[in-house]
Amino acid sequence: MFHVLRELLRIAQGGTAGRRLVSALAIAVGVALGYAVQLIHAVAVAEMAQAARSLSGEADLVVQSAHGGLDETLYGVLAARPEVAVASPVIEIEARLPGRREKLRLLGLDVFRAAELQPAFVARSAADPLDTLRPDRVFLNPAAAAWLGADVGDKVVLQAGIRPVRLRVGGIVGLPGPPLAAMDIAAAQAFFGVAGRISRIELRLAAGVGSERFTRGIAAQLPAGAWVEAAASQADRAAGFTRAYRVNLNVLALVALFAGGLLVFSAQALAVVRRRHQHALLRALGVTRRQLFGLILADGASLGAAGALAGLGLGHALAFGLLATVGPDLGAAYFKGVEAGLAFEPAAMAAFFLLGTAAAVAGSLVPALEMARASPARALHAGDEEQAFSRLPRPRAGLLLMTAGLLLALAPPLGGLPWLGYASIALLLCGCIALLPRAAAAMFALLPAPRPPAAQLALLQLRGAPGQASTSLAPLVASIALAAAMGIMVSSFRTSLIDWLDRILPAELYLRAGSAGDTGYFSPEEQMRISALPGVRRAEFLRSDTVPVAPGRPRLVILAGEIDRAAPERRLPLAGERAMVPKEELPLWASEVAVALNGWRVGERIELILGGRRTHFRVAGIWRDYARTQGAAVIERQAYVSLTGDVRANDAALWLESGASAEAVREAAAAVLPRGSVEAALPGELRRLSLALFDRTFAATYALLGVAVAVGLAGLSASFAALVLARRCEFGVLRHLGMHRREIRAMLAAQGLLLGGIALVVGLLLGWLVSLILIHVVNRQSFHWSMDADLPGGGLLLFAAVLLALTMLTTVLSGRQAMRREAVLAVKEDW
């Protein structure tokens, strides 16, 4: 950071051109970050959507499965209808791989029907054409082949329950997108225990048959909970489920652009004041207010355009580097396995070019208005530039902006996203910056006069020109506020996550065969074997499953476990109200996400499809769940077994006997269960893994905020360098009066300390306010989960100390040029 600041100061001290270069660089950084994030997500989403379209191929409609899949006899009924040209049955499985946490998406297909609808499924590199019909053959797409390191003829091991299933790679299918495997549908049914069931049926209608009329005609033949939807809608959902994450990261990337716009404001305000006599002379020569106003705005626009053009090139290079190192998920797991290549996005390029230019123009607007309104006669007099800094703007505009920002924070989401929450934060930032001159003047007036003469001079100079100080502080205050707000929000999320993990991990050892929807599970015999392990006092088993709720919505994760309906808080981190459920009704505890996505209320009676029939549950309460972003619901395992007949389990929680060693029990489990098919972990290990994933997810957030703070410090550096150059006559007089260089350095350091202190006080207060909007508005409307606000005192104190040191260093380095000049030459300029 020191070297960056020193280099920025060296450039800024080169004069107006240097400060313009620093301002353009800030715009370039903001544009580059926003464009890189947008570019990476655009190509990743396009790749996923293309893969979804390839899966549906030439299908017109898809009959979606209810819980447990569709009875395969429905395929014969639909295929025989005269309106159907081709019907293709599909089994979709999340196949677990022994020893890996990631799952492989596996499709079971009728190769003859699939070839008519999805030509991409035809193997392009098969050792034997008959391999497509052999039960022990699997076909991988290029992404899966690269991920597994497998080629034609190699063996791939999948997991059914906790048993290994060994398959030979029969060929490579030309299907883009994330890792995917395909095999014969009958073999998939036999290997993975879904005989007689299929996941969906893809249909291509005969020529002239309308989709809506056909859908109405087959409604009576569909089982409970099944529905028909257009094949194209599946491709649309590929991007829809990640929209909130992408939009939030894009908005965060624009924080640096906002700080760059404030840096332009600071540089333009100082430049306008320094060139006040020149502008007044132009007015005296006949240039109108409107022409002068347009001239200053055009200067800002040219600065923004140059920075935006540089930012687009830098953003493309940054996106290329991030794709090669981090991947398209940028720390999250939404785009895992997507192989995406960069492509030019003309619309995005135009949008970010305009954003960069607009940010610079907006930064030039206030200085342009101030100069256009100035009286030419007064501005031609010496010393009028000091008056420009001493005049304080009226607080009305700032108060109105702050009030509007607070009111917008109460507004509901638009289109499922917190657009008005973002607008609220922007208005609060702009309102605070508008009030900054008066706030700085009030704080300087309240400060007692220090005893050292250098510190007294520093305070008096700031009291005499509070507008000058606030102009320098604007980018820094905004950066501090946004960094503090995000720091408080991330700390709150992390603390809430730790509390949540403590609540949902009460046991001493955990075993997992697979997660919801995949092929790993414990059979009843294996559950008995686990319960009988030496050292195990009690074992509880959990079954995870997924059920559809409504077309177009994500499938709901059902967690069937041991829970006491009279005291559910022993197992669940409940949030909000709860309802008493009569004995004759089935209780269901819904996660916050499930409630938000489905519009449920506590005490409401809802309907789900379990075991092929409609079942009613009563929402007994709401609980926090940070693990399942599509929504989850907890029900009693006994009720689940009676409804579905499914006695399998995915997870086992073990409580140990007194004196028993968790490591010994883990080794005993490994001895009786197939090696590599079961994950065994202590609660502490699960906590560390979850927190490591959390930190990785927010790595991009930390990086973007670091850039925003650096831009803010660069703004203070460049602005203070300009002010020091403007005050060189003042330093010359002080030198003539006998002030030593070290005393001038002490005066500048004191000013840096005062400016940094003001920036920290205002920035941290504003950041706390913005963090409440992020926690209770933006986060709730984007991801639908709640968290408890947590103020990271130690982190904020460290942040404040480092920032104060950097501001003092910045001001001292800025004064070096002034102190290098001979005092007599500096004073001579004013004779």
Image (spheres, rainbow, N blue to C red):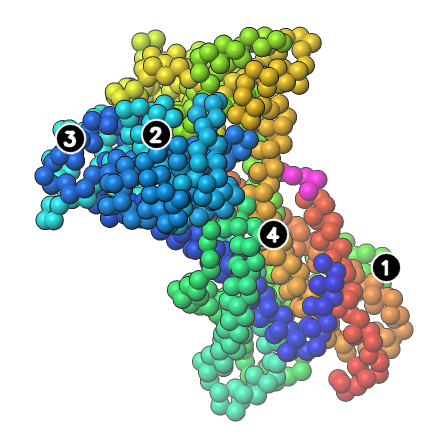
Image point 86% across, 66% down: which residue?
Answer: 743
Q: Which residue is mark 1?
A: 452
Q: Which residue is mark 4?
A: 703
Image point 44% across, 52% down: which residue?
Answer: 44
Distance CA(mark 2)–CA(mark 1): 87 Å
Image point 49% across, 13% down: which residue?
Answer: 527
Distance CA(mark 1)–CA(mark 4): 40 Å
Image point 54% across, 21% down: which residue?
Answer: 674
Residue 336 can be seen in this image: no
Q: 10 Å neighbourhood of mark 2: few (<14), some, or many (≥20)?
A: some
Q: Which is closer to the viewer, label 1 or label 3?
A: 3
Sequence order check: which comes first, mark 4 or mark 2? 2
Q: Which residue is mark 3?
A: 77
Name the foreground residue: 65 vs 189.
189
Q: What is the secondary structure assignment of the residue under circle 2?
A: helix
Q: Which residue is mark 2?
A: 187
Q: What is the secondary structure assignment of the residue under circle 4?
A: helix
Find residue 680 and report its image quarter: top right
Q: What is the secondary structure assignment of the residue under circle 1?
A: loop
Distance CA(mark 4)–CA(mark 2): 48 Å
Residue 280 can be seen in this image: yes
Give the amino acid type for the residue marked by disc 2 in the picture.
Ala
Sequence order check: which comes first, mark 2 or mark 1? 2
Instruction: Find the magenta span and give its range.
Output: 790-795
Give the amino acid type for the residue marked by disc 3 in the picture.
Val
Looking at the rendered image, the quarter that the N terminus falls into is bottom right
Left or right: 59 as drawn, with respect to 286? left
Check residue 588 for magenta coloring.
no
Left or right: 159 as drawn, with respect to 711? left
Distance CA(mark 3)–CA(mark 2): 22 Å
Q: Which is closer to the viewer, label 2 or label 1?
A: 2
